[in-house]
Image (cartoon, rainbow, N blue to C red):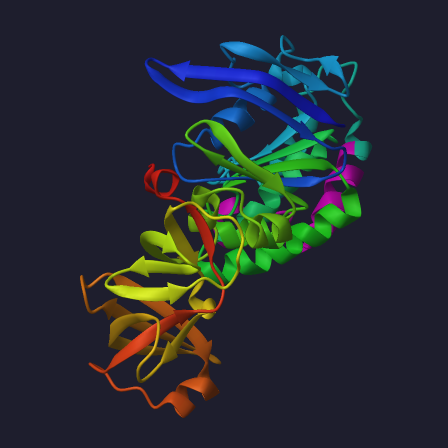
């Protein structure tokens, strides 16, 4: 099922949760709604589900207006952060619940219910816990059961709200890979809400970046990361260092130093430069670059992270480099070096400074 939201606006009192949002979700795609807390992503998901009503705008399913449809008529499955499994029911009965509460004319027979439930438990690789209580399962197992329950009613759309937010990092990573494989098998149109950039970039076919109730950028994970449309997107996706200053003759004058611009693209006269940690090089001796003091050196597997502060105003910077390059540099804590960007994106200072 394809989904389109047109001109969706929603206020809670004086707070504008969504402001004239229009989006298309293609059939069979896995789309991430990504952004900081309070940006409107969960509100948009709930409006698509029929759990919230928009002040203005409409929701279309397969080009048919579904704005006034009751949640039971929208053929959507839900998976929430906190599982919401029934503790007094077995795993089997939790998955069967949506089938058992269907109107009598639509309700499958007992044999068909058992067939569907066991097929789904096989799909989520948990048929062996069918007779157990949810209380006997781990967090990751409970979330897989919650997904099986959502799929039991054969939804046309699957909506997931921070589905892995309550789990530890290792389990989250495992479930992300598992959910992507499951989606590739089922091809159910799926929308999931997250504030975890890694989760969105790893899982989604398309990422929708939201900020303050509006859409900042829509694109593939590669597009939004490598070609951010705004300072907000650049700053939100991945780590970044920022430099503010005046652009003159191919240089950025900042922090009492001159930094050569890697490209000659048209840039604002007063600019904020965003630099990824792996695009910031450490050099010694005279030359262009921002003078900075080495504060801390961390080794993270095959990578090293160097934390530094600008000599002029103690602004913090991060540099990432392979461990072998760290050994070659032979840095010492308290040493003063130069930070030289090899790639950067420039935006107007006013845009970068907006909250």
Image quadrant for the N terminus?
top right
* Magenta highlight range: 113-138
308 left or right of 343 in image: left
Image quadrant for the C terminus?
top left
330 left or right of 109 in image: left
**216 magenta-colored:** no
Q: Residue 48's x, y, as percent?
A: 60, 22
Outermost residue, front side = 249
Q: Vertical placement of 172 versus 213: above or below?
A: below
**133 magenta-colored:** yes
Residue 127 is at least partly visible in this image: no
Q: Is the magenta region chiefly helix, strand or loop?
A: helix
> What's the residue at 20%, 81% (across, down)?
334
> What's the residue at 37%, 58% (across, down)?
252
Observer-nearest residue: 87 or 3? 3
Q: Residue 239's x, y, as percent?
A: 42, 58
Q: How many marks?
A: 0
Where on the picture, by quarter, is residue 67?
top right
> What's the residue at 77%, 41% (across, down)?
187
Observer-nearest residue: 296 or 189? 296
Q: Vertical placement of 130 versus 94: above or below?
A: below
> What's the residue at 41%, 30% (across, down)?
212
Q: Residue 221's x, y, as percent?
A: 62, 50
Observer-nearest residue: 259 or 23? 259
Q: Vertical placement of 173 versus 195: above or below?
A: below
Q: Residue 112's x, y, as percent?
A: 81, 33
190 left or right of 274 in image: right
Q: Vertical placement of 233 versus 318: above or below?
A: above
């Amino acid at each position: 099922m394809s989904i389109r939201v047109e001109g969706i606006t929603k206020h809670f009192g004086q707070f504008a949760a969504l402001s004239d949002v229009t989006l298309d979700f293609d059939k069979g795609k896995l789309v991430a709604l990504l952004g900081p807390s309070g940006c409107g992503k969960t509100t948009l998901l709930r409006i698509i589900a029929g759990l919230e009503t928009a002040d203005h705008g409409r929701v279309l399913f397969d080009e048919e207006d579904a704005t006034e449809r009751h949640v039971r008529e929208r053929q959507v499955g839900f998976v929430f952060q906190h599982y919401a499994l029934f503790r007094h029911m077995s795993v089997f009965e939790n998955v069967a619940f949506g089938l058992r509460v269907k109107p009598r004319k639509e309700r499958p027979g007992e044999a068909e219910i058992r067939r569907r439930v066991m097929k789904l438990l096989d799909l989520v690789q948990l048929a062996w816990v069918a007779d157990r209580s949810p209380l006997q399962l781990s967090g990751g197992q409970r979330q897989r059961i919650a997904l099986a329950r959502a799929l039991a009613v054969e939804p046309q759309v699957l909506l997931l709200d921070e589905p892995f937010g309550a789990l530890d990092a290792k389990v989250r990573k495992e479930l992300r890979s598992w959910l992507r494989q499951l989606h590739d098998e089922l091809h159910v149109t799926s929308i999931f809400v997250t504030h975890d950039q890694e989760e969105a970039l790893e899982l989604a076919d398309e990422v929708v970046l939201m900020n303050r109730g509006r859409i900042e950028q829509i694109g593939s994970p590669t597009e939004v990361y490598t070609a951010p449309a705004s300072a907000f997107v650049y700053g939100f996706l991945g780590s970044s260092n920022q430099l503010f200053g005046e652009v003159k003759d191919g240089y950025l004058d900042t922090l009492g130093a001159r930094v050569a611009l890697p490209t000659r693209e048209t840039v604002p006269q007063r600019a904020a430069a965003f630099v990824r940690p792996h695009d910031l090089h450490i050099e010694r001796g005279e030359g262009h670059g921002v003078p900075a003091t080495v504060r801390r050196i961390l080794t993270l597997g095959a990578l090293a992270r160097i934390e530094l502060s600008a000599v002029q105003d103690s602004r913090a910077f991060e540099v990432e480099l392979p461990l072998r390059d760290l050994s070659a540099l032979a840095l010492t804590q308290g040493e003063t070096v130069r930070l030289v960007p090899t790639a950067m994106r420039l935006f107007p200072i006013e845009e970068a400074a907006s909250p």
